Image: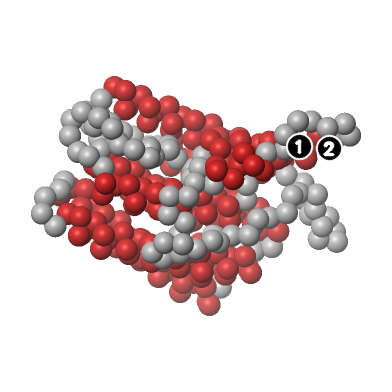
Amino acid sequence: MDIWQRIENDHANIAQLIHETPNALNGSGVVRSRERLLGDLIDELDRHGAALAASLYPPLRREPRTARLVDELAHEQAAFMRDLRALARRGGGAGWLNRFEDVTYAVDQCLHRHVHELVPAAREQLSGDGAERAGHAYVRAKIEALRGRGNPLPGVGFVGGTAAAGAAVAAVAGLVLLAWRLASRPRPTADGTSNRRSERSFGGASGRSGIGRGQPLSDRAADAAPGERRDGEDLRARQERLLDESLEETFPASDPITPKRITR
């Protein structure tokens, strides 16, 4: 899984959290409450921003025509993160849903710019090696963010806290595995070819601003799995495919899975 696919997965997870947060219940007996989902959304956006800042922003800042774009996106993220944290401190009440819609619309617009401005500019500027180095930096930043993650809601019940902790540990383990795979990927040859599998295109538009809301990519992972081993099959290529698809199934969008139905 390359950096473009990781960004796409992060966007899918953010979109899913935005969709589910306003429909969640609140209360002491709710494991995945609205408050908890909002905290997860803030954490996911923080990690996504840190990963971009460590991977794509540095090379794009070196070019005048893309430096302004990076500055604008960083400013937009700082603004909506400030508003989301204020909303989390507010804790609910009259007008909360309307304010949530306003703030998350700004989030959607920023992610729309990632898809249609940031990623195309980065693809154009980064060579094969440059994109691979950016992928390493993206994964390292995500790992560091997950390692430094604390419990955002003191007093969360044992079951919910244990589940979240287990998901976080699984996320770190999977990202370490992804980092190893990236490090072992074959370099392009002198003629620019490589035996790595073809990149899947980045994109796919639906929803409010072109983000595939609630569409985890794990649904496509099982269909793409290599199946039973065949005689004469390239074992290295098979390992690459198995690792890639297992990571997609483990991380539909790079962080603990959000349930489809909120229950007490």
Camera-side residue of 225 and 52: 225
**Residue highlighted by disc 1:** 238
Indicate whether 106 appears above or below 188.
below
Which element type, helix, strand or loop, lies under badge 1?
helix
Residue found 59% across the figure and 45% down from its top = 220
Q: Are marks 2 and 1 in contact (CB under 8 Å)?
A: yes
> How far separated are the C-alphas under marks 2 and 1?
6 Å
Residue 256 is situated, as x and y percent measured from the top left of the image, at: 42, 37
Residue 134 is situated, as x and y percent measured from the top left of the image, at: 59, 54
Q: Which amino acid lies under the numbered mark 1 shown in the image of this protein? A: Arg
Q: Which amino acid lies under the numbered mark 2 shown in the image of this protein? A: Asp
Q: Is residue 139 visible?
A: no
Can you name the residue that lies furthest to the left here? 94
Residue 83 is situated, as x and y percent measured from the top left of the image, at: 24, 58
Which element type, helix, strand or loop, lies under badge 2?
loop
Query: Within 10 angstroms of label 1, few (less than 14), some, or many (20 or more) residues?
Result: some
Indicate whether 29 appears above or below 97.
above
> In which image quadrant can residue 105 be found?
bottom left
**Residue highlighted by disc 2:** 234
Residue found 26% across the figure and 54% down from its top = 84
> In which image quadrant can residue 241 be found?
top right
